[in-house]
């Protein structure tokens, strides 16, 4: 009997490592994985290119489970929640018990509690899952689905999504404001034949009451055409197909992504970047990965007199291609990255070659495009400590280095994070973006998508200092406190919004000597804005999938724009999205 259970267990593990769909960035498991990475449980892996596949997340969770004797009580409580969520174990939070649902292998946890198996509840039945969703189990920690199917090779999960969010803000500039938003939708994801992963997520929301401009402080809503431009509702969709066979993978989809090593800052594709449609080809081995990506972006409209959307709205083509080589020894990761933005023509065959050197190819194609390159690194000199950083080179003239020449455009960030044996993480990060970085002589080739900067979460001619503390209390979400100071030198305009002085503070406005722009720059020149911000918050999940989030903040802007804001955001949510 023990032999049969052992065989069933390894069959289950083999299936778990065959789930190749991506885990959305909205899932809080990535915060927990950063703590795991700090502690050395992500050898030959990294969080610098997100999202990860489900099997990659499961690999880390199983590694943590195998080393649970080294984890604190709160870490184990959080781990067991994720073991349940990713169906490695079913786990009863109240009793402290976990249960391997597929192998039927009962065991006691480290506290010695008796095991109480948990079963899934579904709305639509199948031969495997027959427990009714609308029952007393709806209000406990059982996993909840509209539909769930799993066999040795395939998996289908269909979940509802729902959210109600209330924002409040008091400001000395705009007085008291509030906004009440509501969203609903679904997420369908799974794997076919352990090789083809898929995800489709669609949500729709609307402003039920309050100030639309306050709601638009959310970057996701600012990126939404219907809500921001048409004053309508919010419809957001993300989806992808991902095929993986041995060392090779291929991907097509529209998805929120992040690229670059850092604590909060992702310098190449930032954590405030709009979702973009793209394809990827990659080769991944135990300690090396190569990735080719080609994205379709939204350029600026062709005729500035046009207003609105529709078939008469002319938008030129715009593409972003990149290569990334990543070396991942046990002590971290070092990656080399290069990218090119090109526009106003069809796909360039030279850029579709996944093994070309993009900078040389850009020169061979008559130097029309915006090429960039960079490196990022993650170093673990000791357990619990990591150093992360990125460097982006937009353009450089060697002879002008150190002379304030406008065309020497760079951006970089460096940070360190430490996880104590107690359930506390601390982190520090500094980011600096030089003037004119991300801009180009052809503004269509700026590093923007639909006019929004995607290469950084701060503008050119800016820097930012961040201090972060996370406290883990056994929930899926940590309590957090962020303290940041952002400085930005803005271009100077007159009362008619005509540009008076260009200091390189806008990625859509390039240096122009014919308009009198100086070819020498001073960092933070222009209208200097200093923003001090404190964010404190956390979340609980009293019932599996039903979670409550609270964030309070204080923001003080000094000098050029003087204001004081404080506010709060309360979110009631079913599932993370």
Image (spheres, rainbow, N blue to C red):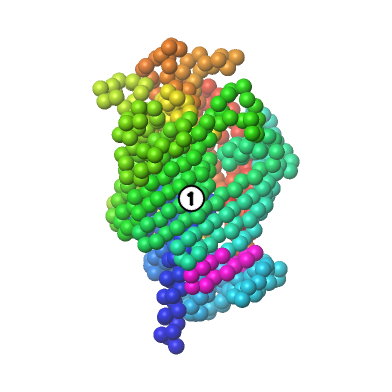
Pick whichever, 520 or 122, lies toward us. Answer: 122
Would you identify the image quadrant in which residue 330 lies?
A: bottom left
User: Looking at the rendering, in which quadrant would you find the N terminus?
Assistant: bottom left
Residue positioned most to the left:
399
Residue positioned most to the right:
209
Q: Position of residue 552 (x, y in %)?
A: 59, 43
- Magenta stretch contains residue 304: no
Q: With 112 as the anchor, is 545 left or right in this view? A: right
The 10 Å Cα crowd at callout 1, few under 14, some 14 to 19, many 20 or more, is some
Say if 543 sits above or below 403 in the image. Answer: below
Which portion, as a residue range, is magenta? 142-156
- Is residue 198 visible in this depiction of the protein? yes
Q: Residue sitting at 48 percent across and 78 percent down?
A: 103
Q: Residue sitting at 48 percent across and 60 percent down?
A: 196
Pick whichever, 446 or 263, lies toward us. Answer: 446
Q: Position of residue 274 (x, y in %)?
A: 53, 40
Pick whichever, 155 or 574, lies toward us. Answer: 155
- Magenta stretch contains residue 148: yes
Would you identify the image quadrant in which residue 404 lies?
A: top left
Q: Which residue is mark 1?
A: 252
Residue positioned most to the bottom:
1
- Is residue 413 visible in this depiction of the protein? no
User: How many discs mark residues in the rendered view?
Assistant: 1
Say if 221 sits above or below 126 in the image. Answer: above
Instruction: Identify the element where label 1 is drawn.
Output: strand
Q: Position of residue 294 (x, y in %)?
A: 43, 43
Q: Position of residue 90 (x, y in %)?
A: 53, 71
Q: Residue sitting at 64 percent across and 58 percent down?
A: 160
Q: With 403 as the anchor, is 311 left or right in this view? A: right
Q: Residue sitting at 32 percent across and 58 percent down?
A: 285
């Amino acid at each position: 009997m023990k032999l049969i259970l052992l065989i069933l267990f390894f069959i289950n593990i083999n299936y778990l490592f065959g789930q190749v769909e991506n885990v959305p960035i909205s899932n809080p498991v990535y915060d927990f994985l950063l703590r795991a990475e700090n502690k050395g449980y992500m050898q030959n892996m990294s969080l610098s290119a997100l999202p990860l596949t489900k099997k990659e997340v499961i690999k880390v969770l199983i590694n943590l489970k195998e080393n649970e004797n080294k984890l604190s009580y709160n870490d184990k409580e959080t781990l067991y929640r994720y073991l349940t969520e990713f169906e490695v174990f079913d786990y009863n939070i109240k009793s402290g018990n976990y249960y391997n649902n597929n192998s039927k292998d009962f065991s006691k946890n480290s506290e010695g509690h008796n095991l109480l198996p948990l079963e899934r509840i579904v709305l639509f039945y199948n031969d495997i899952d027959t427990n009714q969703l609308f029952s007393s189990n709806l209000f406990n920690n059982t996993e909840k689905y509209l539909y769930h199917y799993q066999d040795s090779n395939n998996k289908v999960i269909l979940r509802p999504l729902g959210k109600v969010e209330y924002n409040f803000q008091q400001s000395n500039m705009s007085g008291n404001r509030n906004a009440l938003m509501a969203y609903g939708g679904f997420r369908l994801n799974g794997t076919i034949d352990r090789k083809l992963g898929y995800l489709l997520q669609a949500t729709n929301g609307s402003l039920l009451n309050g100030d639309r401009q306050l709601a638009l402080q959310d970057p996701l809503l600012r990126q939404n055409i219907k809500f921001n431009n048409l004053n309508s509702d919010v419809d957001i969709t993300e989806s992808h197909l991902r095929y993986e066979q041995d060392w090779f993978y291929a991907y097509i989809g529209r998805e929120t992504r992040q690229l670059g090593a850092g604590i909060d800052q992702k310098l190449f594709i930032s954590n405030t970047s709009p979702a973009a449609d793209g394809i990827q080809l990659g080769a991944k081995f135990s300690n090396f990965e190569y990735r080719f990506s080609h994205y379709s972006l939204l350029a600026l409209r062709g005729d500035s007199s046009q207003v609105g959307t529709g078939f008469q709205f002319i938008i030129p083509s715009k593409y972003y291609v990149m290569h990334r080589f990543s070396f991942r020894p046990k002590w971290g990761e070092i990656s080399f990255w290069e990218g090119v933005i090109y526009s106003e023509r069809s796909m360039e065959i030279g850029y579709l070659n996944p093994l070309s050197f993009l900078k040389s190819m850009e020169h061979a194609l008559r130097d029309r495009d915006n090429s960039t390159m960079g490196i990022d690194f993650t170093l673990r000199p000791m357990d619990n400590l990591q150093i992360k950083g990125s460097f982006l080179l937009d353009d450089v003239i060697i002879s002008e280095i150190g002379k304030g020449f406008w065309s020497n455009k760079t951006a970089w960030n460096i940070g360190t994070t430490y996880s104590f044996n107690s359930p506390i993480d601390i982190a520090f990060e500094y980011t600096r973006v030089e003037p004119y970085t991300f801009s180009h002589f052809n503004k269509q080739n700026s590093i923007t998508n639909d006019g929004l900067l995607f290469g950084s979460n701060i503008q050119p001619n800016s820097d930012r200092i961040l201090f972060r503390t996370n406290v883990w209390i056994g929930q899926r979400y940590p309590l957090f406190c962020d303290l940041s100071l952002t400085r930005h030198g803005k271009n100077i305009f007159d009362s008619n919004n005509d540009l008076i002085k260009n200091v390189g503070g806008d990625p859509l406005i390039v240096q122009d000597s014919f308009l009198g722009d100086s070819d020498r720059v001073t960092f933070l020149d222009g209208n200097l804005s200093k923003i001090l911000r404190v964010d404190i918050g956390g979340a609980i999940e009293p019932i599996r999938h039903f979670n409550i989030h609270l964030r309070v903040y204080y923001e003080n802007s000094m000098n050029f724009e003087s204001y004081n804001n404080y506010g709060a955001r309360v979110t009631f949510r079913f599932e993370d999205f």
